[in-house]
Image (cartoon, grey):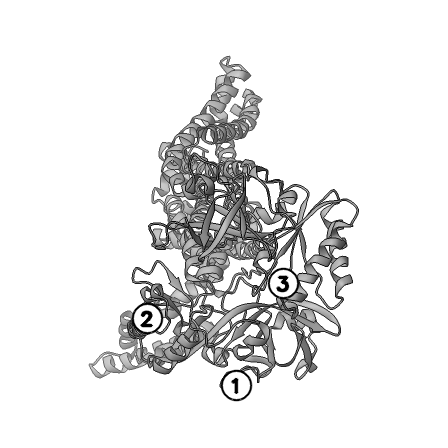
């Protein structure tokens, strides 16, 4: 039979069974007639010939059944039959079905939530672009690929004119903007981009048009702007007439020419991108920056690989061009020559260093969530095993009626897969809710997460649940379909045999062990979070609020900025309840840093051997009073330390010990950028960037001495007795009283800003804590279920024991002992697993050992206590068994 005819007949058989049966009957009839005629031709009588033909063909009904079993449509029809039967059986046992689906949903939801976040942050290609697999970032590195610099505009021009392995190269850089709409200022997260930016990425507009190569023309000739879909909706109310509208950007008129598609969130997707302006407008939006400056490294490069060109080949040719540029010496600085290598990295929505930093963290969480799914699957396997005992008579009767073992296994496995499929659907719903909750975590304002499950996460959930359903459904299915038909029909007692008891116990112990592993992990993260919150940062953050200000984004020059800061200081200081006001360009302990090389005056060579890397900050005279960093020697910064006085700095104790061990540092001098600086005072060491950092040399410079030629982005820091929300309103009023066109600045508590350094531990503690609680709940339910089943199975035995004189306390102790024995095995195995697994968490723990005894003991005690309760409840029921009823009912 031809393939086409087979497919046609198969579909006909599935869609119209009666017609298919008639076709078979017609074919059988035609064959019988032909065979009869052949026998008549051989000399048989018509009756004998027909009888012989019927003997050859057989019964029409039997032939029809044989035909039904031949071909692909038979497997489809059989599956549909199994599916319908499975749904009927689950409908007849709603409690079992709902409990199983709930357990699988919890496990699938946990692993799908973490996978969805991992996918969004690390695996998903850049959203909103065309053929994202061909997009790469081009990073200029040293030969070891450890250090690097960004690109300058001359480097971009040279590289783009010579690179032939790319169909397009574009540049971009982040830039805070203030967009004034109808007299009201809106803070925007902007980007300066080359005219080829959107063309290279393949981004499409939602409204209007995007930039073209024409925007790379004459400087300051393209005062146009493209905005994001989110900014269009929030700032313009999704007004479709926004195209062609003129708004003020940093005090200058710009025309909106387009709105990008909603899917595009910028190059770094976790960071907000509200607007894009042409690179040729740099001089207006970033005063003091010269596009022809060879040493102004501030651009990031993105490119699209040319058709047929591999990333390895393009990287090799890009390195040749980069090396030639570096060796030419055109940049002037000798140190720039070491950055002679190009590295091409696929665009995934995160910079390469950030991806490397978080990949281990997400793998850790993914492993923890995978344990929850494994616990859920083991739990379901135990329930299926118990259900197999209850259905053994049904399976025996079906086997006696002719059902083969393979057919029974397939039916039972179909029921299991249906349960896991419903569980996968529930898990996806849980993942949707959980990812939304993660997106609402208290994060810095510039971060915007999109962790919702996409098709990959949904496919992952379905695949994971199906594989778990098959893996953990096979054993109960084979157990239920065993071939000892006669014995199982005769034996309708609850006893399941020693082998079945052992297999169930193994499943329960595995659950308990994995649950304890999760609890220990959660306990370690909680301990780390607690230790981190107790570390003395060296300053007092209580009662302090911070407000980031950026006059450059408002179109202010240095003179106007200085006047604004001075006026704002006076207005805020006059607010009742304010006790101190100060400014800084680096807020302590917020993962911000700004470093510089310093050396002693006598070390004029400037070699790496004589230089010391120090962290620096620019602060005013009020800063130390706000954060209460004590002065150990000399004086703090004063109001007289301005541009007319000698350059001074206040250093920390580590800086003083590094340069002048055993002696006083006050009055000593050091060089920074060839400028002689005098130490005015020494203050206590603090934590500056991370809680885990070693003591670091740190120098504070007066803002007034760094003013000329420096466009500052300062943070106002205020110590007050008022609540954060109230002082925030007062600060916003003070800002807008100075300039009503300015956007309302965000005001947050310093403690909230400092919390960012504990974000990984906080997220890990929250996630592993939730996963541990779910795992413990499922393990507890599993232990309770197996003990309840054991009590029911041993009801006759317990009745006999009581009839022979056993007391209720004896029965209670016997059952509790059985449960605690399982729990003890689970604890022992779980602790062994934890000893090996928790070492992977070491880098995320603050002064907490991965083998922390307190955590191990506390989690084990909690686990055993819960296990005792799970065993005690069935044991109490067993202790109340009436021996007469137990013996009479069995």
Residue 320 horizontal/vertical position (percent): 28, 73
* Disc 1 packing (10 Å; few <14; some 14–19; many ≥20): few
The answer to which of 813 and 88 lies nearer the viewer is 813
Residue 156 lies in quadrant: bottom left
Q: Is residue 576 left or right of residue 129?
A: right
Question: Which residue is identified by label 3?
Answer: 550
Q: Above or below — where is 517 with respect to 183?
A: above
- The secondary element bearing badge 2 is classed as helix
Horizontally, residue 220 falls left or right of residue 596, namely: right
Quarter of the figure with residue 483: top left
Residue 479 image position (x, y, % from top left)? 37, 43
Residue bearing mark 2: 326
Q: Position of residue 579 (x, y in %)?
A: 73, 43
Chain-order first, disc 3 or disc 1: 1
For the point 53% across and 79% down, the residue is 280
Q: Which residue is mark 1?
A: 218
Residue shown at 43% from the left, 69% from the top: 295
Measure how far apart labels 3 and 1 are at the Cα level.
28 Å
Which percent across, then down, holds residue 104? 50, 49
Mark 3 Cα shell of 10 Å, populated few (<14), some (14-19), many (≥20):
some
Q: Which disc number belongs to residue 117?
A: none
């Amino acid at each position: 039979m031809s393939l086409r005819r087979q497919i046609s007949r198969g579909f006909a058989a599935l869609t119209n069974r009666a017609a298919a049966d008639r076709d078979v009957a017609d074919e059988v009839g035609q064959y019988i007639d032909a065979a009869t005629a052949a026998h008549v031709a051989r000399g048989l009588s018509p009756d004998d010939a027909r009888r012989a033909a019927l003997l050859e063909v057989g019964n029409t009904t039997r032939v029809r059944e044989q035909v039904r079993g031949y071909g692909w449509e038979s497997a489809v029809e059989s599956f549909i039959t199994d599916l319908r039967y499975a749904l009927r059986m689950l409908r007849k046992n709603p409690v079992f079905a709902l409990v199983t689906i709930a357990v699988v949903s919890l496990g699938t939801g946990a692993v799908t939530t973490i996978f969805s976040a991992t996918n969004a942050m690390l695996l998903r290609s850049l959203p909103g672009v065309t053929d994202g697999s061909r997009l790469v970032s081009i990073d200029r590195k040293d030969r070891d690929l450890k250090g690097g610099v960004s690109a300058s505009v001359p480097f971009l021009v040279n590289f783009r004119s010579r690179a032939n392995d790319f169909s397009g190269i574009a540049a971009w850089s982040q830039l805070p903007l203030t967009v004034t709409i109808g007299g009201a200022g809106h803070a925007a997260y902007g980007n300066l981009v080359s005219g080829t930016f959107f063309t290279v990425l393949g981004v499409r507009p939602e409204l209007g048009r995007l930039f073209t190569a024409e925007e790379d023309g004459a400087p300051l000739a393209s005062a146009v702007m493209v905005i994001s879909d989110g900014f269009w909706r929030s700032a313009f109310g999704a007004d479709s007439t926004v195209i062609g509208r003129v708004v003020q950007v940093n005090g200058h008129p710009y025309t909106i020419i387009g709105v990008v598609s909603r899917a595009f969130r910028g190059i770094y997707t976790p960071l907000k991108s509200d607007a894009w302006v042409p690179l040729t407008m740099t001089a207006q939006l970033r005063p003091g920056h010269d596009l022809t400056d060879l040493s102004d490294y501030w651009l990031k490069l993105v490119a699209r690989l040319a058709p047929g060109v591999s990333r390895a080949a393009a990287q090799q040719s890009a390195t040749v061009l980069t090396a030639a540029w570096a060796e030419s010496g055109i940049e002037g600085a000798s140190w720039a020559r070491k950055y002679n290598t190009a590295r091409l990295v696929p665009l995934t929505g995160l910079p390469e260093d950030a991806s490397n930093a978080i990949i281990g963290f997400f793998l850790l969480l993914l492993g923890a969530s995978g344990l929850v799914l494994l616990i859920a699957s083991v739990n379901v396997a135990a329930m299926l095993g118990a259900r197999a005992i209850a259905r053994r008579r049904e399976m025996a009767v079906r086997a006696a009626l002719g059902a083969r073992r393979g057919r029974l296994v397939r039916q039972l496995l179909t029921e299991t897969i249906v349960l896991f499929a419903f569980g996968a659907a529930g898990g996806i719903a849980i993942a949707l809710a959980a990812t939304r909750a993660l997106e609402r975590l208290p994060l810095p304002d510039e971060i915007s997460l999109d962790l919702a499950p996409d098709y990959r996460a949904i496919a992952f959930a379905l695949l994971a649940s199906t594989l778990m359903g098959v893996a953990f459904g096979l054993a109960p299915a084979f157990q239920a379909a065993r071939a000892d038909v006669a014995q199982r029909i005769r034996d309708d007692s609850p006893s399941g045999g020693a082998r079945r008891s052992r297999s169930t116990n193994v499943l329960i112990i595995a659950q308990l062990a994995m649950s304890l592993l999760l609890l220990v992990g959660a306990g370690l993260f909680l301990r780390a979070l607690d230790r981190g919150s107790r570390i003395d940062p060296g300053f007092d953050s209580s009662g302090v609020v911070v407000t980031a200000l950026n006059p450059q984004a408002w179109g202010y020059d240095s003179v106007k900025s200085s006047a604004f800061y001075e006026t704002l200081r006076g207005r805020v200081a006059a607010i009742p309840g304010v006790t101190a006001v100060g400014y800084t360009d680096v807020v302590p302990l917020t993962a911000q840093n700004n470093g510089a090389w310093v050396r002693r005056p006598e070390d004029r060579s400037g070699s790496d051997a004589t230089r010391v890397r120090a962290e620096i900050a620019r602060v005013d005279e009020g800063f130390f009073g706000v954060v209460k960093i004590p002065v150990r020697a000399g004086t703090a910064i004063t109001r007289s330390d301005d541009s007319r006085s000698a350059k001074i700095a206040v250093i920390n104790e580590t800086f003083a010990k590094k340069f002048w061990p055993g002696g006083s540092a006050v009055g000593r001098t050091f060089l920074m950028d060839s400028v002689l600086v005098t130490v005015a005072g020494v203050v206590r060491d603090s934590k500056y960037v991370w809680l885990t950092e070693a003591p670091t040399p740190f120098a504070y410079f007066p803002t007034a001495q760094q003013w000329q030629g420096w466009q500052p982005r300062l943070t106002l820091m205020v110590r007050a007795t008022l609540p954060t929300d109230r002082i925030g309103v007062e600060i916003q009023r003070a800002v807008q009283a100075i300039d009503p066109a300015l956007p309302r600045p965000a005001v947050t508590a310093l403690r909230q800003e400092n919390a960012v350094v504990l974000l990984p531990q906080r997220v890990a503690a929250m996630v592993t804590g939730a996963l541990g609680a779910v795992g413990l709940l499922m393990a507890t339910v599993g232990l309770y279920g197996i003990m309840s089943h054991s009590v029911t199975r041993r009801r006759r035995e317990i009745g006999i024991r009581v009839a022979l004189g056993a007391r209720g306390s004896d029965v209670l102790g016997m059952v509790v002992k059985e449960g605690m024995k399982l729990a003890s095995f689970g604890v022992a195995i779980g602790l062994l697993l934890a000893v090996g697994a928790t070492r992977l968490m070491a880098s995320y723990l603050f002064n907490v050992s991965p083998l922390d005894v307190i955590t191990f003991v506390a989690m084990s005690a909690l686990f055993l206590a819960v296990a005792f309760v799970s065993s005690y409840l069935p044991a109490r029921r067993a202790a109340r068994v009436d021996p007469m009823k137990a013996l009479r009912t069995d």
